[in-house]
Image (tube, helix red, strand yellow):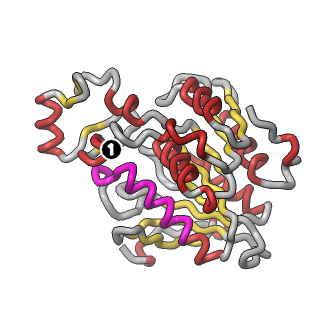
Amino acid sequence: MSDATLPANPPDTGAEVLVRTHDGLRLAGTLLVPPGHHDGSRDAALFLHGSGADREQGGLFTRVARGLADGGVATLRFDLPGHGHSEGRQAELSLSGLLNLIGSGLRELRERTGAARIAVLAAGLTGGVAAGYAARRGDEIGRLVLFDPLIDYQEHFTADSPRWRGGRLTEPAGRTLLADGALASACGLAAGRAMLNEVFWLQPRGVLGAVTAPTLIVHGTGAARVPVASSRSAAGALTAEHRLVELPPGGDALAGAVSAALAWLLPAATDAGDDAPG
């Protein structure tokens, strides 16, 4: 892949960039730096989409990035490996690899904008990983926004699945994994062997109490891959400043999610004193 092969974007949505990962992959990204953004004097935000999506997250990330740009915040969003226009294969994704992707994105933002304070926004699959990163490297993340976050990876990938019995893959499922290199999951990810092993050991819920970044969780209350009860439990485990916004079905959930994120991230949109935990 080269810069020339990347799809062009309208000027108001940002410039196409390549983000290099720890292990050498080139990820297709969009960097949006608003006019007047001065090195080190403004905030920035990193976006991590969920499985089965791309860097726009169904338009959610596009709209939030534009709103942040209007508030003077630079943003970077990129396609995960095996998604969109990025290199790599979905089957090679792992939870540890996703943690490293966050590190790569943060480094890219710092180098390109000079921003010292960076917020992280994550959706679905990447939500739990983002929380885990914030728990381990809290000094790198200013604020955290999680949309319908997947927190319980083991439960999601193995519980109530006919492929798993007693914590082990059935013989037919094991043969399929060997032949295809991945198994389809409920979240739309082609999960490879590394991911299916890690979900038994890497559990973000256990470290939520160590997250120090102010955290917003936005979750729909309708039928979803990740039930809202998961986010309610996660909010109860957080000890840092936090807020849970539940979006009922039937309304404009996208607009509600955008509004909640911008209010949380832009100082001009809300008084910090009104962001009470709970």
| 138 to the left or right of 155 | right
Q: Residue at x 50, y 30 (%)?
A: 226
Among the 4 quarters of the image, the one containing residue 40: bottom right
* Residue at the disc numbered 1: 198
Quadrant occupied by the N terminus: bottom left
Q: Position of residue 242 (x, y in %)?
A: 71, 40
Helix, strand or loop at disc 1? helix
Prevailing secondary structure of the magenta residues: helix
| Magenta-drawn segment | 90-107
Quadrant occupied by the C terminus: top right
Is residue 14 at least partly visible in the picture?
yes
Above or below — where is 66 with respect to 182? below
| Amino acid type assigned to the residue bearing label 1 in the image | Glu
| 170 to the left or right of 144 | left
Q: Residue at x 61, y 24 (%)?
A: 221
Among the 4 quarters of the image, the one containing residue 257: top right
Is residue 219 at least partly visible in the picture?
no
Q: Position of residue 192 (x, y in %)?
A: 26, 46
Q: Residue at x 59, y 68 (%)?
A: 31
Would you say residue 104 sits in the magenta stretch?
yes
